[in-house]
Image (spheres, helix red, strand yellow):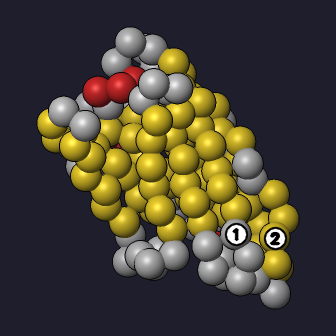
């Protein structure tokens, strides 16, 4: 199985930046689709971004419309680590952010991700 643990959350002012990290383990981590989801109080957990491997050193990234142009997902498989660079943060980005792993290429649906981290809180103040 794959185990994952997020870090890097915190409190930031609107317009600021944060970089989230997700440390993973397991033999299949490097071949997995890796994703970020977020959940605000009283709302459904929603897709943020994913990154998949389509060939040797070839990655494919996908983003929710709400974060396109502001967030960037990346991975370092040599370190078993997933990242989410968040720029131009808005109060509506406030949520618990989760990293996850899937065996489905370009997965954007929560139910396609069987492995999850514990979440890290991101709070954006106005």
Say which label, 1 or 2, has the lower sequence index: 2
State which quadrant residue 102 falls in.
Answer: top left
48 shown above or below 28? below
Q: Quadrant of residue 55 in the image? A: top left
| Residue 100 image label | none
Where is residue 86? Give x, y as percent: 60, 66
Residue 36 position within the rendered picture, expressed as x and y whole percent measured from the top left: 48, 51
Q: Residues within 10 Å of mark 2 (few under 14, many from 20)?
A: some
The residue positioned farthest toward the left in the image shown: 55
**Residue shown at the point (65%, 39%) measured from the top left:** 6
Work out whether residue 40 or residue 89 is closer to the camera in this orientation and state it.
89
Element class at badge 2: strand
Residue 100 visible? The answer is no
Q: Relative to residue 24, is residue 99 depicted above or below?
A: below
Residue in the image at 51% along x and 18% along y? 25
Quarter of the image where the C terminus is located: bottom right
Query: In this rendering, would 55 be left or right of 113?
Result: left
Q: Is mark 1 on a helix, strand or loop?
A: loop
Give me the residue at 45% from left, 14% from top: 26
Residue depicted at 26% across the width and 31% down the height = 103
Q: Kindly check if marks 1 and 2 are in contact, taking CB atoms under 8 A apart as contact.
A: yes
In 3D space, how far apart are the residues under numbered discs 1 and 2 (Cα atoms)?
Answer: 7 Å
In the rendered view of the protein, which quadrant contains the N terminus? top left
Q: In the rendered image, is residue 99 in sight?
A: yes
Check disc 1 and report the residue beneath it: 17
User: Could you say which disc has been placed on residue 12 in the image?
Assistant: 2
Q: Which of marks 1 and 2 is in front?
A: 1
Q: Is residue 56 left or right of residue 6?
A: left
Pick whichever, 20 or 99, lies toward us: 20
Q: Position of residue 65 (x, y in %)?
A: 38, 77
């Amino acid at each position: 199985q794959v185990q994952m643990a997020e870090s890097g959350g915190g409190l930031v002012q609107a317009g600021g930046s944060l970089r989230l990290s997700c440390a993973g383990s397991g033999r299949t981590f490097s071949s997995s689709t890796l994703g970020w989801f977020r959940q605000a109080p009283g709302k459904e957990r929603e897709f943020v971004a994913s990154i998949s491997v389509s060939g040797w050193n070839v990655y494919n990234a996908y983003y929710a419309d709400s974060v396109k142009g502001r967030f960037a997902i990346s991975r370092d498989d040599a370190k078993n680590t997933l990242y989410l660079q968040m720029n131009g943060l808005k109060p509506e980005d406030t949520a618990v952010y989760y990293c996850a792993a899937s065996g489905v290429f370009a997965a954007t649906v929560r139910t396609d991700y069987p492995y999850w981290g514990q979440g890290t809180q991101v709070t954006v103040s106005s």
